[in-house]
Amino acid sequence: MEKTPTNHSRRSFLKTSVLAGGGLMISFSWLPKFASAGNAHALDLPELQWNEITGYIKITPDNIIKILNPNPEFGQNVMTSLPMMVAEELDIDWQKVVVEMGPHDNVKLGPQFTGGSNSIRMYWKPLREAGAAARSMLIEAAAQTWGVPAEEITTKEGILYHEKSGKSGTYGSVAAKAASLPIPKGIKLNNAKQFNVVRHSKKNVEGVKIVTGKPLFGMDYTTEGMLIAMIEHPPAFGMKLTSFDATETLKMPGIKDVFRQQLYPDGYEQAGFDTRTFNELLVVVGNTTWEVMNARKKLKVNWEPIADTKEVIAGRGGKKEVVVPAGLESSNVQMAKMIEQAKKPAQQLRKDGDPETAFKNAATIIERTYTAPFLAHNCMEPMNFFAHVTDDQALVIGPHQAPGWIEPTLSKILNLPADKIEIRMARMGGGFGLRAYGHYVTEAALISRKVKAPVKLVYSREDDMTYGIYRPMYTATYRAALDANKNLIAFHVKGGGIPESPIHANRFPAGAVDNYLAESWELPTNITIGAFRAPRSNFNAAAEQSFLDELAEAMGKDPIDFRLELLKRAKENPVGKNNEYDADRYAGVLKLVKEKSGWKNPANNKYSRGVAAYFCHNSYAAHVVDVVKKDGQPYVERVFSAMDCGIVINPDAATNMVQGAVVDGIGNALYGRLSHKDGMAEQNNFTRYRMIRMREAPKKIEVHFVENDIDPTGLGEPPFPPIFGAVANAIYKNTGKRVYNQPYMDALNSTPKAGF
Amino acid sequence: MATYELTINGKQYKVDADPSTPVLWILRDHLDMVGTKFGCGLAQCGACTIHLGDMATRSCVLPVSSIGNQEITTIEGLSDTGDHPVQKAWVDLDVAQCGYCQAGQIMTAAALLKRNKNPSDEEIASAMDGNICRCGTYLRIKAAVKTAAASL
């Protein structure tokens, strides 16, 4: 194998963009800096002879070692942490590694999906195996070259040694031979207790590029002859395009075209992440972003209400026909509908024991209802994508969490075979679940094909915030039955939402209570929803953990001790068989946060303290939130966090992630809301959508990880949900007021709004 | 359309653009300097922060016609090799998550430290409050401002 095999037709297709200096993931100019901080000689990278040892690992004869990161980066630091797992087994000097975003190639680079807090988990074994296999191939190549037994060869940081003969050589010196050897399987992997790279903090490999403003993001991509496109979408959900007059728009400088474009053909069967809000697009194409933004204002457009619309969606749980209801929806009406629906019979998800009788015999019943609004993801980088589609091929470049999901959609919509579609992954300016949906990729591709030019589709902030694919609206009513001795004898949760239910029936406290009932319902809407950091969990943890706090108080128990008692029961004598969580690990984070926060230490009495814990994405999180009064309002001044996500790959970056999740959670709990009036989003920019800012962020967030050798699990999402509950519980201690409806600031302001 | 002569990062540029064009889009679309980010278009998030003279300024609402002979500095020109004390502190503390807002954060912080070499917590919060970080890296941003201040 001489050079890395390259698809030459694609290569020539890409040439223009590379030469135009807009190269994004293959912008060669920065790579030499990366090769080594102390070895900044200029490398003419395109001329380098990369020997591909495995799909993830390439080595030059000069011993430059490149690791391809398979998964899209949206701030969770996979560009660093995934290659660390390769390096752990390959035995190389981390400082000299070149890390590059890999191409979309599910055969060589695995699932390539960012979401569900799954990146580390899904690649934990394959990447270490790739590193170990490559090292073994390099040893074998050296053994053949030197004529010595492979077993006698050792490695250290990219160098091979044969002690008896005194021979040594770099990985690079045998890389060409190694690349021709078969990839071995079943190589023994390093012991977790002796990791050299994993478990040692490494800086973000793109840190320098980020602070110097290098073109990393989809929004930064440019190429010769590229046009800018924007889409004018209906002003409200439940509306569609009727007709338009673009006369004035087309007179504006720099404007090339205005046209109508249908996104999905009639009868198109949507895949699970093909969610889109508006199917009829009104597209404005021009030379520069500002010209297109200005020209849009001159459009004269007529919109009309939609009728009930049938759509076929093949998502989780198979193919189903969904009716998107007509109507211009308003949040206060939706809230009233949810409250009405909650009174009606619902679908039973789980039942243990005899909850009806237990509630009948209860000495005390505590019942509380919680609600939450739609939330917008508000990624800092608005949605955008570059596309260059010709009759026989497509190149799309930009921010997307799931290239393997968008490829079949593009293939169907563009009627091109998958191997004629190249998807290149840009660093994402946030994702939070929204960028798992690919409508804007397909939109960009169709626009490019129509105008026969390379196009970058750009959403304004207003487009981004009012488009939809929000966190759903949720509500849940929790009931607890206590006997005369204040023992918990039954637990009931009935929850629903617009348009999906949040309820996870088999999570704590299921398994810890003899008589348990979980019920669920859903109401349709034409407002599109989607995954938002820890879907469903991000509401459940707010509601359930607030309720458990109130329950502990009613039972006269400490809120941590109460949870630990329930978990003890769930461990020793679990109710039911299908309990998703490990009671020991759940208790572990509570015990750790109790210790680290000095939960009962009188020195902390000046704080109003709230606790919450949650299990999701295979990991466990607990927080203690310390609130004080600042300017007459509760302020989260400190947070102590305890996490159990198994082995922590990159401790400092993991700490950053948890700190960020805490801040994100506080912000959304206090301020997050996307509401509607007659189908129109009432917030369309940061003027009206309040985001947490530095002043409202805690002064200190102390993060502690449970130390164990369990295979790593999720971290991006798990710390987020329980922050909501911990904040609510601390607010109660601070103000004497329980908050039930998000965003909590409504209740803290003097005149709360009706509903939310 | 009009022609503007701009001094950006110490170099002269000539651009033809509509007078209303915000400096953000002059940089990004006309001059291919994309370190300055588009976030909101309404001076609400700070992602587009540049220096106009020594002042941190939101370039998304700054018409090119208003610049005159004032000098513009962008993230690309803050230092030659990424070694401005603020940039170094950002790397040392590994501040960024997604990184999209950080150029704006850094430009705001650098302007603050130019006029106040030893800002208090309150002064930092006051200066930085217009810059949103959706990933929630505010603690590290604040710590990095202090680290940079200490190195001045």
Image: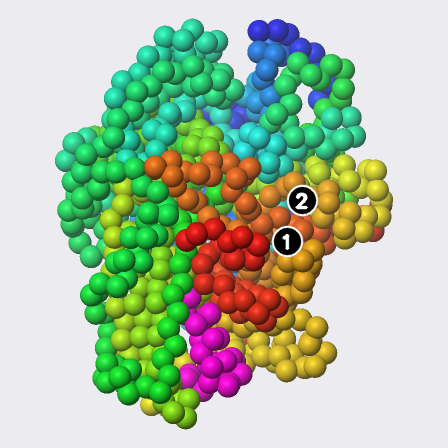
Total marks drawn? 2
Question: Would you say A191 lies left or right of A358 here?
Answer: right
**Hey, which quadrant is residue B111 in on the image?**
top right
Q: Which x, y percent locates residue A608?
A: 63, 71
Q: Residue furthest bottom?
A: A485
Point out the image quarter for the N terminus of chain A.
top left
Q: Which x, y percent locates residue B68?
A: 73, 14
User: Label 2 sits on what residue type?
Assistant: Asp
Residue drawn 44% across the image and 78% down it = A551
Q: Residue furthest front?
A: A751
| Magenta part of the chain | A543-571
Pointer 1: residues within 10 angstroms few (<14), some, or many (20+)? some
What secondary structure is found at the residue carrying circle 1? helix
User: Label 1 sits on what residue type?
Assistant: Glu
Residue drawn 77% across the image and 53% down it = B121
Residue A481 seen by the camera? yes
For disc 1, the marked residue is A696
Query: Which of the labelled discs sits on residue B129, or is there none?
Result: 2
What secondary structure is found at the residue carrying circle 2? loop
**Mark 2–mark 1 distance (CA, rounded to whole Å):** 9 Å
Q: Residue B149, relative to residue A341: is it above or below?
A: above
Q: Which x, y percent locates residue A499?
A: 28, 51
Q: Does A558 lie within the magenta span?
A: yes
Which chain does tag 2 point to?
B
Residue drawn 33% across the image and 47% down it = A333
Which chain does tag 1 point to?
A
Foreground pick, B66 / A56: B66
Residue drawn 26% across the image and 26% down it = A304
Q: Which x, y percent locates residue A602?
A: 70, 81
Question: Would you say A307 lies left or right of A578 here?
Answer: left
